[in-house]
Amino acid sequence: MGVFILVSGIIGYLGYSADKEIEKTVTDQFNRQQLILARKVAHAIRNHFNYLETNLFEFNQFWERDIKRPDVARTDIASLFALVRDWHVLAIVHVDRKGKPILTLSEQEFTDGAGLGIDYEEYRQWGIKPEHRGKILAGRTFRPEAGLFKGRWLMVMATPTYRPATGHGGDSGYQFEGLSLMVVDPIGIAMRYARDVRSGKTGYAWVIDHRGTFLSHFEDTFIGEDSFTVRQRRNPRISYAQINEAVRKHLLKGEEGAGWYISGWHRGVIHEMKKLFAYSPIFLSKEDDTGNLWSVAVVAPEAEVYGIIQSLVIRQWLIAGAFQLVVFACLAAAIYFSLRWSRILQAEVDERTADLRSSEAEVRQERDRVKESMQKLVEMQEKLVRSERFAAIGEAAAYLSHEIKNPLMLMGGFAGQVEKSLPEDDPKRQKLKIIQDETRRLELMLAEVRDFTRPAKPQKELQNINSVIEDTLALMENKMMDKGIEYKKVLDDRLPAVLFDPQQIKQALINLVKNAVEAMAQGGKLVISSRREDGHIKVSVADSGPGIPPEVLKQVFNPFFTTKKKGTGLGLAVSRKIMEDHEGEIFVQCEEGKGTRVTIALPIKPEETI
Ligand code: ADP
Ligand code: MG
């Protein structure tokens, strides 16, 4: 928007200055044309006077040559006058050397020259000077107060009449005999050439004499009036100081030039306006009266010039406007498209970002899945290794127990028989008793090893775990009482029946309770609880024993790991094997000093529950 305003401003400024430039050029051009017109008018008037001068010389020749036959001259003089009448000559006069009119011809009447009301003395004074022989004086305009031309603007052209001296002598050989004069109508002459001049459509020309009196003007009422005052009368609200000064300083000084001034009217229209004008002088008398000059001015209102350039200016502004419109349209289009383009880009970017985000989430999910399956794989491998190891151990144990069992039973049996055969107080009986005890212990151990190694695919049946717990406690009750252990059942009686091998699960629970009891040699508390949690049925055996130190805890599930003198290290290992065979879990939680809590968890499979 700012750019647009700036461009508009620049265009506006350029247009304006171009306008001014054009206006100035056209104004100058226009005034030059006006000056040419003014010069032409001045030239025509000058030529007019030249023509009159020729005729005046001709008229004078009648008196210089043939004074003796004035009657003959009269006819010729009459025809001459008829000729010059059309050239605004009002009268031709001849006066004698004393200044007395001899012949006057006006309006085809020969009259007494005195009746014209013109004083010839001033012309006689000039003509009597010998150096003025053969010269013409153009007099200044004047208005006689009496006579035929009373109140009318006149001008007199005079030339002296000299004849060769006839004996009485004379300085130059010529003798002043009188004066030939032409009375001319200055207004007629000025109007003849200036009146119909047109500058532009409505411009016109005016002519003033040496005094500033209008000799010709578009306005009839101005003719013969003083230009310095008549304008003021026409429209008094405007100061004409400017034009008056120009007239005084330039026109009446015989200068040629152009300029402008403020006027109060133009033709019929009366209001303030600027006028362009050009002026050119007419020198009527070069040597004898340099101040006797007229001036022709050609004026036109400035509006004339605008009339000429208006269509040009309008066209120029139209072009500028159209150009600006195009610029604006281009700008708008550019903004629109760039906005649209960025919107499209934004949408694209958003879409891509969303895609990326969703694929990132997918990748993360995939990664988690891979991690999970890796974990499973590792666990499976561990289990596999474990079961391989179990299998190997199991085979060895089965073989050993088979090999050991019979001789062991024999040894025990024989020891019993030998003992019975000895008298009550025989000291050897004691030794035989030890053999029997140790044999039984070994037998038990063998049984445990056999349990552990027996290939045991669970014989699953739908059972409620609580009944297995009851069975286990029934088996262990006596042992606990012996050791001074209190026990407590916290059973959830809303548990569903699930599929499991009751013998194996009972074995696992017995192992846990046994460990708890063994951990509380000085007595304590045992809590056995059942509950439903996280899609599993869980059974915990908690004791108030010493707990398990961390470095031991790491190994408790290893087969044959034991901290007990007569332990086998198989209880937890077997239990875990059983839980794994049930797709369940076993875990130990303990806090040192506060006891141990071992939990088994059986999965609840909806298709296997009731
Ligand atoms: P064993 O009982 O023959 O030692 P187990 O596999 O049953 O073999 O137990 C392994 C070891 O775990 C035990 O020797 C004992 O150190 C530890 N343990 C098991 N249960 C408990 C318990 N409730 N409190 C303290 N220690 C226990
Ligand atoms: Mg044990």
Image (spheres, rainbow, N blue to C red):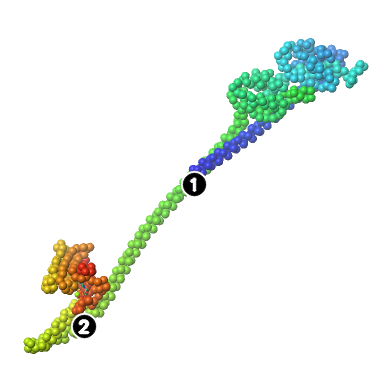
Q: Which residue is mark 1?
A: 334
Q: Is residue 576 visible?
A: yes
The residue tagged 2 is: 399
Query: Considering the numbered disc 1 on the image, is that residue within a helix, a strand or a loop?
Result: helix
Is disc 2 placed on a helix, strand or loop? Answer: helix
Residue 241 to residue 459: above or below: above
In the rendered image, which quarter is residue 152 located in?
top right
Tell me the residue at 60%/31% (across/down).
306
Label for residue 59? none
- Tell me the CA gap for discs 2 and 1: 95 Å
Which numbered mark, 2 or 1, is in the foreground of this view? 2
Location of the C terminus (image quadrant): bottom left
User: Where is residue 415 shown, x and y percent of the image?
Assistant: 12, 87
Residue type for callout 2 = Tyr
Please state if 348 lies on the left or on the right of 126 as rendered: left
- At label 1, the amino acid type is Ala
Relative to the observer, which residue lies in front, 410 or 89?
Answer: 410
